[in-house]
Amino acid sequence: MNPAQNRRGALFMVLAMACFALEDACLKAATQSVPPAIAIMGFGLLGVAAFSLIALLRGERPVPRLTRGLMLRSGIELCGRLFYSLALAFTGLGLTSAILQATPLVVVAGAVVVFGERVGWRRWLAIAVGLVGVMMVLRPTGEGMDMAAIFAVLGMLGFAGRDLATRAAPLSVTNAQLGVLGMSVLFVAGLVVQLASGTPLVLPAPLPAALIAATALFGVAAYASLTVAMRTGEVSVVTPFRYTRLIFALILAAVMFNEVPDGWMIAGCVLIVGSGLFTLARGRRMV
């Protein structure tokens, strides 16, 4: 693959991460005016509509045949999206995004348990360092960790499980169909929160409704850009640019929500990202 294709793939990956960060920021902003359940359900419904339209324009069925593998993937993704959305609503955008960056490390560790893959001691050490970085970001006290921060960890674990379960999904399932399933799961997650809270179901005012619509718009744009990135450049070259999401998230957190990372969070982020990049590099070297 020529360098121009890799550069194009890297640019689209950066664009995708910027859109994902904007998606998270808009969802968090919406939850400051409406209950999280309303924002999550609205995002899910709009996302389903958008990905269904994309599938129809491509001549695909919006909903694939539900196999056991797809149902497993959707169930795990339900947990990931539910807890990650709650983390965005109840804790800082920067903290939630920082914890999310540990997903590749958990995926590597999970692949050993689930698929029997071999991981050398250097990558195990990198995984351990990354988890230390997670603890530095969380900073548990003698009284334990804040429940909202635990939501971020559970969301990250859910997304890691989803990535592992993706291997069980049939290769015939298209990206748009996976998008429909993912957004359907997001709607279900919001419905779970709504039923658990017992609050009345109300329509959002114009401003939060616009924020929810922007969340869906950035989400679809992020997914489309990510697809182009992975299909244009070499995976080993393009994938490390996923970590730019944290940079965008920290900037948006400071500008939109006055969140200023302290030394512990910055150090934790460096450990998480550094160990992730090392793990990617070692994995590429062993292929």
Image (tube, rainbow, N blue to C red):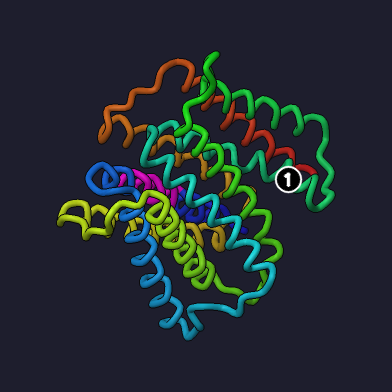
Where residue 259 appears, x then y in whole percent?
Answer: 32, 27
| Residue 15 visible at all | no
Where residue 33 appears, x then y in whole percent?
Answer: 22, 45
Tell me the element at label 1.
Answer: helix
* Residue 65 as seen in the image, left or right of residue 86: right
Q: Nearest the camera: 32 or 200?
A: 200
Q: Nearest the camera: 170 or 233?
A: 170
Where residue 39 appears, x then y in whole percent?
Answer: 32, 54
| Residue 19 visible at all | yes
Placement of 277 over or under 84, stated as above or below = above
21 in the magenta segment: yes
Dominant secondary structure, magenta: helix
Placement of 56 over or under 7, stated as above or below = below
Q: Residue at x 61, y 55 (%)?
A: 162
The residue most toward the bottom is 59
Placement of 149 over or under 79, stated as above or below = above
Report which residue position mark 1 lands on: 110
* Residue 287 as seen in the image, left or right of residue 7: right
Q: Residue at x 49, y 57 (%)?
A: 226
Amino acid residing under circle 1: Gly
Label 1 CA crowd tier, 10 Å (few <14, some 14–19, many 20+): some
The residue most toward the left is 206
139 in the magenta segment: no
| Quarter occupied by residue 190 | bottom left
* Magenta span: 14-26
